[in-house]
């Protein structure tokens, strides 16, 4: 047995030497070698010491330094963001502090073995410095995923088979190897976090042949977790099963779950249903009897340092915990009345408190928080949820095991480390000859959505449309429509299920661009999906009104921050977005536009008059919805005033809404029910005929984003307009030139302008002509959509 052990150690030594030589010759091998070493060597030990990954890190860095001196690699001058600088200096402060504590521990204990920790933290500091200087280039994200996956397969296969063969041939227990050849199960299972993250990426982003590798890893790691009775391993797998529900296709999630359930039921209990249910409960239990001992160690560690302010802040020095903690455990009854051993092996957070004090614990968690913030707020981060889950696990890990000597942990959280590198968007070349794949997340009951999307369906685009509402605003050809029966409400449980549905659809569609219309439910779901590039079109009330809500506001602001580009149709909305923290370079003004070929003056406008039996009566028209914000009641009151001078006046009110009954009651109370015709909702295609029949268009809205679509459509049809002084109406309508602007909620002023225009037909005609010219020049549908098409080209070809 000793011969076998020493043969293994010789292999380790030769592996380090080969690592140095290969990296010195080919520096691009630095990361592949270090990633494999940190995964495969993470749980291995040399006679109880976890030195293998540390040794290989040192040999890899030696190779990197040789390559640097030989000119094979060089420092790169790059501009650092404030987050990068904060993260780097905070990490270096932590490393410097731990170095001081290591020297302190060496002096206190007078034990040369503590020099291991001095070397260890020097190596980590050197690695952080080289990364900050951009001296070591990362492989592609795809290669990193495969390297970690293959290393994980090798590691967990070796972990499983070593225990099996040891029991088969030595007649000992697999647990005899813990603390000698392998670390305890908690520490040995730590690589499972990043290995399963790579599996999720394989299943999500790679071709089916590579999926086999992912399924095999899940199978082997689940077997290993149960074989060694690792509650930590099982909890990690359960966490990733939940993550798979969100990130993977539903079939993949079910297969993942089935692998786990089958092994759970039959590996441990031979198919017993009772045993099967019992182990499920046990596996998901967050507390077991062994945790009581860990909690006592933590309490004893805190008790030990809080006696004096100095020790509370700085502790006693690295590795002093084994001598300090005994009396405090005795006070807590840990030894149940027995004698206190002179040296006690303690781990986890209790050991960290004694060794480094509150400052050491603070610096460790501060680094976790900073890297978590960088992951959370990184734009177009394809791994946000996965990495946040792992960071959460690392935050809890010190409660059960040591993390100070785990190289893999530091490779993940170090500045410019794995988390930060893989939080960048993955750039993939696109075929310039294939059509751009657009996916819209927009309400299908809005004509604005239909107009926008239909333009690109007629061009060289592959268009998909996802909607939380049924398609009622008009049919479109050449499109894949997905009706998601989402709840569409901004509540945590609703958002969770809607986000899962949206993620699965996006995995199926694989668009080049996701474009969400309206920053309410659509924009929030699009942001939560994590898909990029994400374009968000705001419509008005979503940012002018809803951002003031204590519930909706934070969600909408989150959606705005996550969008790669925001479009709006009014300059004052640009100002509002700026106030919400969105920079102008992220905003483009694209108007919804009016189809001036569809909405134009008609040669024979009398069909609707005949249909409604209006003959030559003066006709006013309104196209606004019957909602309080559009103040249609002011129009009805104005018609009552106009009717005193023009008794044959008629008014068409087209639209529907919550005020339908109250507005009808108002017409009856004013005794003008013969003057007002409530038409109800009309398809957009029928509006040109009704506008052609009208003499004057009126909008009494209390608020508008830019110019309303109905006002622009009326102007395109050559109908003179009278509108209230809201939104950006003054930028489109110059009162007395191409229409009239009146104060809001002023029926008398409105009536006066209606009467004046009815009495001046030439002015009506000139207003109408000038209004159409304005729309043709500034708000033509085809010109605006062509602008948007150029934007799609830029974002689709830049990144996927």
Image: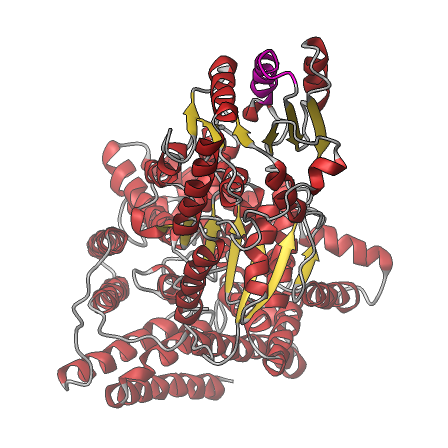
User: For the magenta stretch, what is the residue range?
Assistant: 632-647
Nearer-the-camera pick, 700 or 200: 700
Nearer-the-camera pick, 338 or 659: 659
On whether residue 643 falls in the magenta region, the answer is: yes
- Residue 340 visible in the picture: no
Locate residue 427, reporting x and y percent: 41, 71
Tell me how the rendering is colored. secondary structure
Q: Is residue 526 left or right of residue 508?
A: left
- Residue 320 visible in the picture: yes
Nearer-the-camera pick, 550 or 798: 798
Location of residue 283 with respect to 578 vertically, above or below:
below
Q: Is residue 769 left or right of residue 20?
A: right
Locate residue 64, reporting x and y percent: 23, 79
Q: Residue at x 25, y 61 (%)?
A: 111
On whether residue 413 falls in the magenta region, the answer is: no
Q: Is residue 122 left or right of residue 720?
A: left
């Amino acid at each position: 047995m000793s011969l076998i052990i020493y043969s293994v150690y010789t292999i380790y030594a030769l592996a380090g030497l080969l690592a140095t030589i290969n990296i010195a010759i080919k520096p691009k091998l630095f990361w592949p070698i270090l990633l494999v070493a940190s995964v495969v060597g993470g749980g291995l030990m040399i006679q109880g010491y976890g030195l293998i990954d540390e040794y290989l890190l040192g040999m890899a860095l030696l190779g990197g330094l040789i390559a640097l001196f030989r000119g094979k690699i060089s420092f790169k001058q790059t501009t650092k963001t404030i987050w990068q600088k904060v993260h780097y200096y905070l990490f270096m402060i932590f490393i410097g502090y731990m170095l001081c504590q290591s020297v302190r521990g060496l002096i206190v204990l007078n034990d040369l073995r503590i020099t291991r920790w001095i070397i260890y933290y020097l190596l980590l500091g050197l690695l952080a410095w080289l990364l900050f200087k951009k001296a070591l280039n990362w492989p592609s994200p795809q290669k990193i995923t495969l390297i970690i996956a293959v290393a994980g397969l090798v590691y967990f296969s070796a972990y499983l088979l070593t225990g099996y063969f040891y029991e088969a041939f030595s007649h000992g227990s697999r647990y005899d190897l813990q603390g000698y050849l392998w670390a305890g199960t908690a520490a040995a299972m730590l690589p499972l976090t990043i290995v399963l993250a790579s599996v999720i990426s394989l299943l999500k982003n790679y071709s089916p042949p590579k999926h086999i590798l992912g399924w095999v890893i899940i199978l082997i790691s689940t077997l290993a977790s149960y074989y060694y009775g690792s509650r930590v391993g099982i909890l990690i797998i359960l966490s990733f099963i939940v993550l798979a529900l969100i990130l993977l296709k539903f079939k993949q999630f079910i297969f993942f779950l089935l692998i786990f359930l089958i092994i759970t039921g039959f590996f441990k209990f031979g198919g017993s249903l009772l045993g099967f249910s019992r182990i499920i409960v046990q596996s998901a239990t967050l507390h077991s009897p062994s945790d009581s001992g860990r909690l006592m160690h933590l309490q004893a560690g805190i008790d030990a340092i809080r006696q004096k302010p100095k020790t509370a802040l700085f502790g006693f020095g690295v590795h002093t915990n084994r001598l300090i903690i005994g009396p405090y455990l005795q006070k807590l009854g840990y030894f149940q009345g027995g004698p206190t051993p002179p040296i006690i092996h303690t781990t986890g957070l209790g050991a960290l408190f004694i060794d480094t004090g509150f400052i050491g614990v603070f610096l460790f968690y501060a680094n976790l928080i900073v890297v978590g913030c960088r992951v959370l707020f990184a734009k177009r981060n394809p791994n946000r949820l996965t990495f946040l889950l792992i960071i959460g696990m690392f935050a809890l890990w010190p409660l059960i095991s040591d993390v100070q000597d785990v190289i893999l942990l530091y490779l993940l959280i170090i500045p410019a480390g794995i988390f930060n590198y893989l939080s960048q968007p993955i750039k993939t070349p696109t075929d310039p000859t294939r059509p751009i794949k657009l996916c819209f997340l927009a309400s299908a009951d809005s004509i604005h959505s239909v107009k926008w999307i239909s333009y690109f369906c007629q061009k060289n685009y592959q268009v998909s449309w996802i909607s939380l509402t049924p398609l009622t605003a008009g049919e479109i050809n050449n499109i894949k429509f997905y009706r998601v029966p989402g709840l569409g409400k901004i509540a945590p449980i609703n958002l969770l299920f809607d986000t899962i549905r949206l993620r699965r659809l996006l995995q199926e569609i694989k668009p080049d661009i996701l474009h969400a219309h309206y920053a309410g439910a659509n924009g929030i779901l699009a942001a939560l999906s994590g898909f990029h590039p994400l374009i968000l079109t705001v419509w008005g009330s979503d940012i002018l009104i809803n951002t003031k809500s204590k519930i909706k506001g934070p969600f909408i602001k989150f959606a705005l921050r996550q969008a790669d580009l925001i479009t709006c149709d009014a300059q004052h909305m640009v100002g509002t977005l700026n106030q919400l923290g969105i920079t102008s370079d992220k905003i483009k003004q694209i108007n919804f536009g009016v189809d001036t070929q569809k909405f134009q003056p008609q040669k024979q406008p009398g069909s609707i008059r005949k249909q409604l039996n209006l003959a030559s009566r003066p006709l006013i028209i309104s196209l606004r919805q019957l909602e309080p914000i559009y103040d249609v009641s002011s129009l009805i009151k104005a018609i009552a005033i106009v009717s005193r001078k023009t008794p044959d006046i008629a008014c068409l009110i087209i639209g529907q809404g919550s005020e339908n009954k109250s507005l009808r009651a108002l017409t009856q109370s004013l005794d003008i029910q013969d003057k007002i015709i409530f038409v109800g909702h009309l398809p957009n295609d029928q509006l040109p005929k009704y506008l052609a029949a009208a003499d004057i268009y009126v909008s009494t809205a209390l608020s508008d984003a830019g110019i309303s679509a109905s006002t622009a459509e009326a102007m395109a049809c050559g109908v003179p307009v009278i509108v209230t002084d809201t939104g950006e109406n003054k930028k489109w309508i110059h009162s007395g030139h191409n229409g009239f602007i009146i104060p809001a909620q002023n029926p008398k002023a409105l009536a006066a302008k209606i009467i004046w225009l009815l009495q001046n037909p030439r002015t009506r005609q000139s207003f109408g002509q000038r209004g159409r010219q304005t729309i043709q020049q500034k708000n033509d549908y085809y010109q605006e959509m062509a602008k948007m098409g150029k934007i799609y080209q830029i974002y689709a070809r830049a990144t996927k």
